[in-house]
Image (cartoon, rainbow, N blue to C red):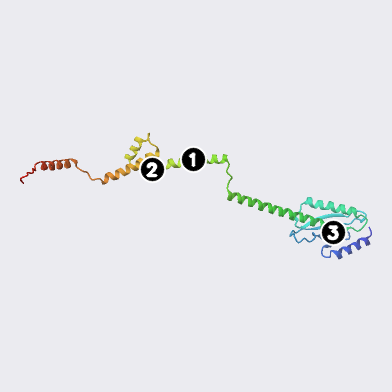
Amino acid sequence: MSSDVLLEEFEVLESIYPSELTKISDTVIQIDVEPEEDRDSDELLKLTLEVQYPRQYPDVLPELSLYAIEGEGEIEDSEINDLLKDLLAVGEENLGIAMTFTLVSHLREQLSTFVKARTERRRQEDREKERLAIEAEEARTRGTSVTLESFRAWKIIFDQEQAALKKNLEEEKYRGLTPKEREEIKRVGGRLSGRQLFERHRNLEEDEKLEEGTVSVDFSQYDRTRREEEEEDEGITFSDSD
């Protein structure tokens, strides 16, 4: 390789990439490479392409290396290896001529494609998250769909709960009865339902209230007074002469 040929290529590259190119030695350079500008993407990705030129360059391929300097957490080693393989394939097509500019231009295009694919993948992931969130909210507000089997299972549990509640209420009422009322309920308990028992209890309470307000009457006194009035009527006689 003629040093003049390489120096000439370096001059061209420095004019194209004034801030991106760093000359490491007479045969090694580094160029920072970013994707082509894409206004629809806010992804950050920047790689450094290191090129080591062998003596036989450009008749043989330079040795290429790639390092992520921005977005390094977003690109895998396997993806960097794929980019390098693609660059070497492009280099094979350009053997015999200065190829560094062509390699850098191709890498920019590949990074643009990579970033667009990653942006679209993230958008799809965001849409999927949004869809799942909407479905979860609809399911929460809509409730669980009722089937015949689920209704039957619910009905069994509901009936058990209602029976237990009714039993507790009856036991509570029973505890509030007087001994006399409890004895009466026991006496007729085998013949009356729970509802009838407590209706009877209510009637017993009403009867007791009536008994408390009742005035006793001596019917023997009433009969004696009536007999005396009848005897007086029989002792009175009427005469035509009167």
Mark 3 or 1: in front is 1
Query: SS for tag 3?
Result: helix
User: Residue 204 at what x, y percent from top left?
Assistant: 32, 41
Q: Name the amino acid type tagged 2.
A: Lys
Query: SS for tag 1?
Result: helix
Residue assigned mark 1: 159
Q: Is residue 133 left or right of residue 174?
A: right
The answer to whether marks 3 and 1 mark residues whose Cβ atoms lie closer than 8 Å is no
Q: Is residue 183 left or right of residue 8?
A: left
Label whose residue precedes the other's in the sequence (2 or 1): 1
Which residue is more in the foreground, 206 or 63? 206
Q: Name the amino acid type tagged 3.
A: Ser
Label ID, residue 173: 2
**Which residue lies at the image location 87% right of the left edge and 63% below the top edge?**
13
Mark 3 or 2: in front is 2
Quadrant into which the N terminus falls: bottom right
Residue assigned mark 3: 105
The answer to whether marks 2 and 1 mark residues whose Cβ atoms lie closer than 8 Å is no
Task: Please determine whether, in this image, residue 20 is positioned above or below residue 224.
Answer: below
Can residue 73 be seen from the camera position used here?
no
Q: Is residue 130 left or right of residue 178?
A: right
**Which residue lies at the image location 33% right of the left edge and 40% below the top edge?**
181
Q: Give the CA distance from mark 3 to mark 2.
A: 92 Å
Q: Is the residue marked by circle 2 packed among few (<14), some (14-19), or many (20+) residues within 10 Å?
A: few
User: Residue 104 at what x, y percent from top left?
Assistant: 84, 58
Task: Please determine whether, in this image, residue 178 is positioned above or below residue 85.
Answer: above
Q: Is the residue marked by circle 3 packed among few (<14), some (14-19), or many (20+) residues within 10 Å?
A: some
Label whose residue precedes the other's in the sequence (3 or 1): 3
**Which residue lies at the image location 86% right of the left edge and 65% below the top edge?**
15
The answer to whether marks 3 and 2 mark residues whose Cβ atoms lie closer than 8 Å is no
